[in-house]
Image (cartoon, helix red, strand yellow):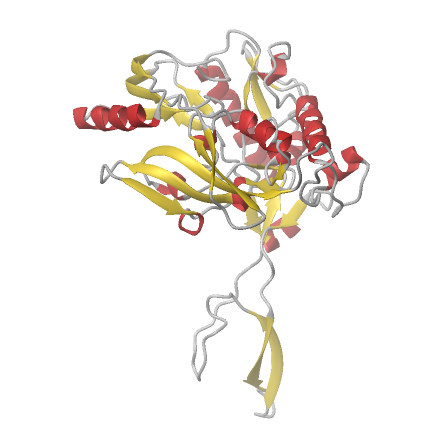
Amino acid sequence: MTTLRVGGPASRIVEPTGEPALLQTALGVWRTGDDWVVLGGGSNVVVSDDGFDGTVIRVATRGIARIVAPSGAVRLRVQAGEPWDDLVAYTVEHGWSGLEALSGIPGSTGASPIQNIGAYGQEVGDSLVSVDFLDYGTGRVERIARDELELGYRTSVFKRGKRGVVLSVTFSLTDAGTDASALGDPIVYPQLAQALGVSVGDRVPLVDVRRAVLTLRASKGMVLDTSDPDSVSAGSFFTNPIVGENFARGLPSDAPRWLVEPEAAPLVVALPDPATGLSLDVSARLDASVAGASGAGASRTAREPQVKLSAAWLIERAGITRGFSLPGSRAAISSKHTLAIVNRGGASAADIGELARYIQNRVSAEFGVLLHPEPVYVGSAN
């Protein structure tokens, strides 16, 4: 039931196929007091070899419904169990833009806001309107608006402790047209622009974007394919680390890096010159949360800009190459992309965890950066 094909048995597996059944099932499981976990497409989890001593709620609900939307927009309410790439294909076929660069990502729609999935310049949060959610604490269904989801790079309020079950997700897309020439959002990711033969900022037909993204992902083993052993993975195993700008300056000059938030606007403040006692205008960059402070003695703290690094680059420069594996292990680095750990056949969750820890230790020793796993560990697999 997982794309890594590792993990022991669960005590119990339930698989509701409709939203009412999903509600009743989850509430019934919670009343027992047993341990439980929600499973979607199984593409971002590592399950312990010992399995899971509890109930697995495998969400198998389906359905895409168009609902009332403002003029020029398309709103879709999508059941949590709808396969993600089926949804993307559906929107492209209908000429609706907003999700096309997220083609080929495995897993279910309900899982998409959990870590705010993203690729090639698009994130789920860009098009998400709200999530219908069955809350574990209250046993009630609530509609959580996008602004309340605390979306960030591979994170959300659900990653910060909010427990329950995603029932459906509502998206707002742009009606780009109904034929094959319907244009997608402007291309913002250089690698995708290069693959399409266009410049960053250009718009191209949705079908071309989807085709190019699927080709790029397949070249990295990131599209599920029974004929490709490199696709037996959990996708990218580590998130790209985010560090302070000062720390990033200490890395080799060729280390890829991206500023992850706008630098704060300069603020001119008057400070006394120690020599003359006269006021001097000094330009300082201040955190937005304190830039509005006023009056003598106001406390203001400069915030260091944050920089995103390339986990794949760090792994490669730490001496771990594509295809690498530990002696006797059936887990390996993908032969196509250093950011994926693959099951070469017969690997255990322990093999996966051992290789992941080895990579973390090597990168930490070489660069002082701790890589964080992107998949969710179930049981003692880590």
Tell how many labels. 0
Please determine whether, in this image, residue 162 is positioned above or below residue 30. below
Task: Pinpoint residue 93: horizontal percent, then vertical percent.
Answer: 63, 29
Closest to the observer, 253 or 71: 71
Q: Is residue 285 above or below residue 107?
A: below
Q: 328 left or right of 216? A: left
Res 89 → quadrant: top right
- As drawn, the residue found furthest toward the left would be 32
Q: Nearer the viewer, residue 74 or 6?
A: 74
Q: Nearer the viewer, residue 215 or 380?
A: 215
In the rendered image, the quadrant that contains the N terminus is top left
In the image shown, does 106 or 374 lie closer to the viewer? 106
User: Is residue 251 among what the camera can see?
Assistant: no
Give residue 6's position: percent from left, percent from top: 45, 13
Q: Is residue 107 left or right of residue 18?
A: right
Question: Residue at (63%, 18%) from the top-left corner?
Answer: 324
Q: Position of residue 134 (x, y in %)?
A: 30, 36
The C terminus sits in image quarter: top left
| Quarter assignment of residue 78 | top left
Identified at 70% across, 31% down, the residue is 207
The structure residue drawn at horizontal position 50% and vertical position 17%, both measured from the top left corner, is 4
Residue sitting at x 62%, y 16%: 230
Going by the picture, which residue comes out furthest to the top?
346
23 to the left or right of 360: left
Q: Is residue 287 visible?
A: yes
Q: Residue furthest right?
A: 197
Point out residue 114 in the picture as x, y percentages from the top left corner.
44, 36
Residue 190 falls in which quadrant of the image? top right
